[in-house]
Image (cartoon, rainbow, N blue to C red):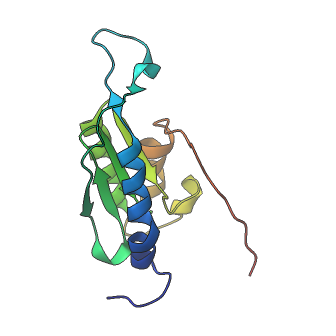
C-alpha cells in the first residue's frame, strides 16, 4: 500500500470512487426512441437507483471503470497509451450512450509530450480524445508556480 497521503490511490479511495459512484447513482437514463435523430433525446427518468459497479484498472495509479447498465465512467485516466486503448474500447462499447472521463490527468494534447516508448502517443491522443468531440462539462484548472 502506498501510504503517501495524497497519492493517486488515496485520492481515488477517498474522493474519486465515492463521488463517481454517487454521481452515477443519481443518473437515470432513458434511451432514445428508435429512429429518432435528436441527439439530446436521452432524458432522465424517475426509475430506481441503478446498481453501480467499480472495477480497478491498475491498482497503483487509482484508475478504474465505474459503471451502471447505461453509463460508463473512466476515473483518473492518464497519458499512458493503455488508457487511449481503453477509451477507444469503451467508446465503441457504449456507442451513443453516456461515457464519462472523470478527472483525467491531462489538460490538452500537449500533456502527452515525447515518449520514446509511445512515439505516436500525442497523435493517437488527438485522434482518440480531442478529435472525438468529448465535451467538458465541469473543469477547475489551477495554475501554480513553484
What x and y, as percent, mark residue 13? 38, 73
When asked about the image quadrant of residue 94, the answer is top left
Whether residue 138 is situated above or below residue 81 in the rendered picture = above
User: What residue do we see at 55% from left, 53% from top?
Assistant: 109
What x and y, as percent, mark residue 133? 50, 35
When asked about the image quadrant of residue 82, the answer is bottom left
What x and y, as percent, mark residue 39? 44, 20
Whether residue 67 is situated above or below residue 15 in the rendered picture = above
- Residue situated in front as seen by the camera: 47 or 76: 47
User: What residue do we see at 39% from left, 24% from top?
Assistant: 42
User: What residue do we see at 49% from left, 39% from top?
Assistant: 134
Number of marks: 0
- Residue situated in front as seen by the camera: 50 or 63: 50
What x and y, as percent, mark residue 22? 40, 54
- Residue situated in front as seen by the camera: 139 or 20: 20
Left or right of 59, for residue 107: right
Left or right of 30, for residue 14: right
- Residue 120 in sight from this viewpoint: no
User: What residue do we see at 41% from left, 46% from top?
Assistant: 100
Amino acid at each position: 500500500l502506498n501510504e503517501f497521503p495524497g497519492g493517486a490511490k488515496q485520492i481515488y479511495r477517498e474522493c474519486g470512487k465515492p463521488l463517481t459512484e454517487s454521481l452515477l447513482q443519481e443518473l437515470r437514463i432513458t434511451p432514445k426512441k428508435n429512429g429518432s435523430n435528436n441527439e439530446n433525446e436521452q432524458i432522465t427518468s424517475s426509475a430506481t437507483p441503478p446498481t453501480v459497479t467499480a472495477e480497478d484498472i491498475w491498482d497503483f495509479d487509482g484508475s478504474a471503470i465505474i459503471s451502471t447498465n447505461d453509463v460508463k465512467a473512466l476515473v483518473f485516466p492518464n497519458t499512458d497509451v493503455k488508457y487511449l486503448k481503453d477509451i477507444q474500447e469503451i467508446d465503441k462499447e457504449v456507442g451513443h450512450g453516456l461515457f464519462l472521463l472523470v478527472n483525467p490527468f491531462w489538460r490538452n494534447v500537449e500533456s502527452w509530450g515525447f515518449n520514446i516508448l509511445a512515439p505516436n502517443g500525442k497523435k493517437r491522443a488527438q485522434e482518440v480524445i480531442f478529435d472525438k468531440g468529448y465535451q467538458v462539462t465541469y473543469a477547475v484548472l489551477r495554475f501554480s508556480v513553484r
